[in-house]
Amino acid sequence: MKRAVHEVTPEVDANALLDGAQFIDAYRVEIGAIALNAREACIRMVLHGPRWIDALLRLRNILVRPFGLKTSGEGAPAPHGLIGLLPVVSETPERLVAGFDDDHLDFRLVVELAGDAAGRQVTSTTLVRTHNLLGRT
């Protein structure tokens, strides 16, 4: 079943998550009474997305490899393992923070669950802090 996704005002503490972030956005979807924790929601978003996103990521990795840019989160601190390419930085049942720091930009993905058993929502917030022109393209 497809559910409507809506852009919302980010409600995270950006300074605590990624001080100096220049780009922040958030999207929310109502999931009703579906029993889900933050890790399961993140896995569904990251690992079960549209195939065209996977194709673009593969193309991106081929194009940036000669420049020495990371093609995954491999080697980044991941105290709670990886989800796809993303190292999990911190995790509770209601909130998962993933992402890594790189030479050209730092990235965080925050997946949060809220609401009661009858009307739950998943909010995905991304934060980006660039270091140079390469991180802005």
Image (spheres, rainbow, N blue to C red):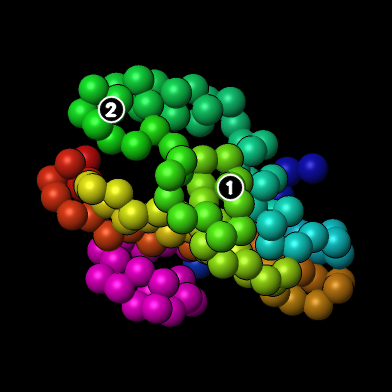
Q: Is residue 75 above or below residue 53?
A: below
Q: Is residue 82 magenta?
A: no
Q: Specify the segment rendered in magenta.
A: 9-27
**For residue 53, which numbered disc appears in the image?**
none
Q: Is residue 76 left or right of residue 133?
A: right
- The number of discs equals 2
**Residue at position x 40%, y 53% from top?**
100
Q: Is residue 7 above or below residue 83?
A: below
**Residue at position x 35%, y 20% from top?**
62
Q: CA distance from mark 2 to mark 1?
A: 21 Å
Nearer to me, 44 or 104: 104
Residue 40 coordinates in the image, percent (x, y): 73, 53
Check the image and name the residue furthest to the left: 133
**Residue at position x 85%, y 61% from top?**
35
Q: Which quarter of the figure is the N terminus placed in?
A: top right
User: Label 2: how many residues lie within 10 Å, few (<14), some (14-19) or many (20+)?
Assistant: few
User: Label 1: how many residues lie within 10 Å, few (<14), some (14-19) or many (20+)?
Assistant: some
**Residue at position x 24%, y 31% from top?**
68
Residue 64 coordinates in the image, percent (x, y): 28, 27
Nearest to viewer (mark 2 / mark 1):
1
Residue for badge 2: 64
Q: Is residue 78 left or right of residue 39?
A: left
Residue for badge 1: 82
Nearer to me, 119 or 88: 88
Compare marks 2 and 1 and give the one earlier in the sequence: 2
Q: Is residue 137 above or below residue 51?
A: below
